[in-house]
Image: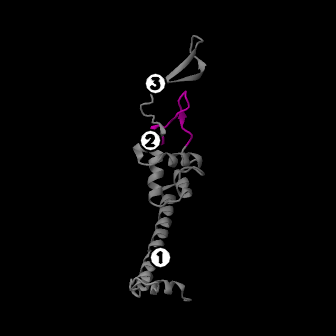
Amino acid sequence: MITLRSVVGTDTSGYFIMAITSPRAALKRAELAGRLGCNLETIRYYEKIELLPEPARTASGHRLYSNEDQVRLRFILRARSLGFSVEDVRSLLGINDGRPSCAEVRALAEAHRGDIRKRIADLKQMDRRLGEIMAGCTGAETPDCALTDKLFEDS
């Protein structure tokens, strides 16, 4: 498929010129989603909140994503899979204030890792407490259950 786009201006002979570009590197949204293993709505969302820039379009209005878009989306998906918030990703990409320094990125990652460790500790505590409560539950086929009784207690 070849996409024709008009260029603002003329060539040396005064004729309007058309730039012919091959979208080999360009992917439609569904192709990009398939390649990166995400869904279409994810890509739409990241465009809407401006983590992904507005992509180029074909003459018929189909979005075309460049290799740069693909690299950027892969970065976003990886950062999100590590639990970074949208605002953290925005900072990592330097959308608001320019590209962050390595020290700034490390500080953000260390803070995030601290949050993860806190959540892990909280989950371990919840697991321990739930295990204690479950120990009193016989699993009998009666409506009386020590587990629900414990949950209703004032402690």
Q: Which mark is residue 2?
A: 3
Q: Which mark is residue 31?
A: none
Which amino acid type is shown beneath numbered disc 2?
Answer: Leu
Q: In terms of sequence position, does the residue under pointer 1 or pointer 3 come before the other?
A: 3
Residue 73 highlighted magenta (yes or no): no
Residue nearest the observer in this picture, 59 or 145: 145
Residue 1 against residue 54 in the figure, above or below:
above
Q: Is residue 66 magenta?
A: yes
Give the residue displayed 59% in from the left and 51% down from the top.
Answer: 97
Q: Count the marks.
A: 3
The residue to which callout 2 is attached is 32
Residue type at numbered disc 3 = Ile
What x and y, as percent, mark residue 110? 47, 65
The quadrant of the image that shows the C terminus is bottom right
Position of 71 with respect to 88 (left or right) is left
- At mark 2, the secondary structure is helix
Q: Residue farthest to the front?
A: 142
Q: Magenta residues, as a range?
A: 53-70
To which quarter of the image does residue 16 belong? top right
User: What residue is disc 1 on?
Assistant: 122
Screen quadrant of the N terminus: top left
Q: Position of residue 142 (x, y in %)?
A: 43, 84
Residue 100 lies, with reference to residue 149, above or below; the image says above
Q: Are marks 3 and 2 in contact (CB under 8 Å)?
A: no
Image quadrant assignment for residue 52: top right
Sooner in the amino-acid sequence: mark 2 or mark 1: 2
Which class describes the residues within 10 Å of circle 3: few (<14), some (14-19), or many (20+)? Answer: few
**Given contact means CB atoms under 8 Å apart, are the residues at marks 1 and 3 in contact?**
no
**What residue do we see at 55% from left, 53% from top?**
90
Cα–Cα gap, marks 3 and 2 = 18 Å
Residue for point 48% across, 40% down: 29
Q: Is residue 19 above or below residue 93?
A: above
